[in-house]
Image: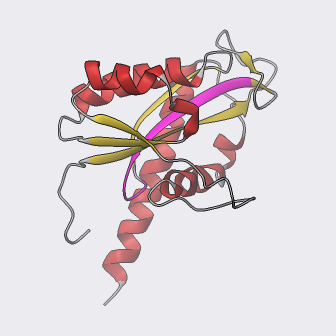
Amino acid sequence: MVGKAPTPTMAIIDTQSVKTTETGGPERGYDGGKHVKGRKRHLLVDTLGLVLLVLVHSAACSDRQGAKIVLTEAAHRVPTLKKVLADGTYRGTLVDWVKQQCSFVLEIRLRPDERPGFVPIPQRWKIERTLGWLNRYRVLSKDYEYAPESSAAWVLVTSTRIMLSRLRRALAEP
């Protein structure tokens, strides 16, 4: 992409709960907020919507606990990060924890209260778009894998396919 640095300075984090099959393995749980029995996928994407990191674990684990793992890993793997955007799920003590533990800041972007329904929030909509792209693939519509590591690998394989498809289209344009 023209005008973009090779490594990102800003990223976006979000969580998706997905159902598992009955043989979903040991890392299954219940997400009471979304009423889903299965696993959670924590994704960190850049401003182009490309997946930087993915973590899959039991849905019983809170979003903030998973975010600590992802953001700690991001501080090591993506040293150029200066800011990570998140929704209101991540506000509170996590913002201070990130400030102390990581080399970047966690910025919370909230939906305006006066506008009901879906409101696209600047930059944050990009992770929702990525989740939508990933959910188009049957292998990710539900978590069929026994091990969470296999599930995370499928997210990376699928995101690689999406990235290559975007690159092919960009190269085909005159």
Which color mode does the image show? secondary structure
Q: Within the magenta stretch, is there residue 173?
A: no
Quadrant containing the C terminus is: bottom left
49 or 145, which lies in front?
49
Q: In this view, does 136 lie above or below 39?
A: below
Give the residue displayed 57% in from the left and 53% down from the top.
128
128 or 155, which lies in front?
128
Q: In this view, does 47 lie to the left or right of 63?
A: left
Place of residue 70 in the rendered image (x, y in percent of width and height, measured from the top left): 41, 26
Give the residue displayed 66% in from the left and 55% down from the top.
136
Place of residue 87 in the rendered image (x, y in percent of width and height, measured from the top left): 54, 42
Q: Is residue 95 left or right of residue 147?
A: left
Place of residue 61 in the rendered image (x, y in percent of width and height, measured from the top left): 61, 16
Q: Is residue 7 left or right of residue 107?
A: left
Q: In this view, does 21 lie to the left or right of 16?
A: right
Q: Say which quarter of the image contains residue 93.
A: top left
Q: Within the magenta stretch, is there residue 41?
A: yes
Place of residue 62 in the rendered image (x, y in percent of width and height, measured from the top left): 60, 19
Quadrant containing the N terminus is: bottom left
Q: How many labels does the image show?
A: 0
Give the residue displayed 53% in from the left and 26% down from the top.
150
Q: Is residue 85 above or below residue 40?
A: below
Query: Start and end of the magenta stretch?
Result: 38-49
Give the residue displayed 39% in from the left and 60% down from the top.
164
26 or 79, which lies in front?
79
27 or 48, which lies in front?
48
Q: Which secondary structure is most common in the magenta stretch?
A: strand
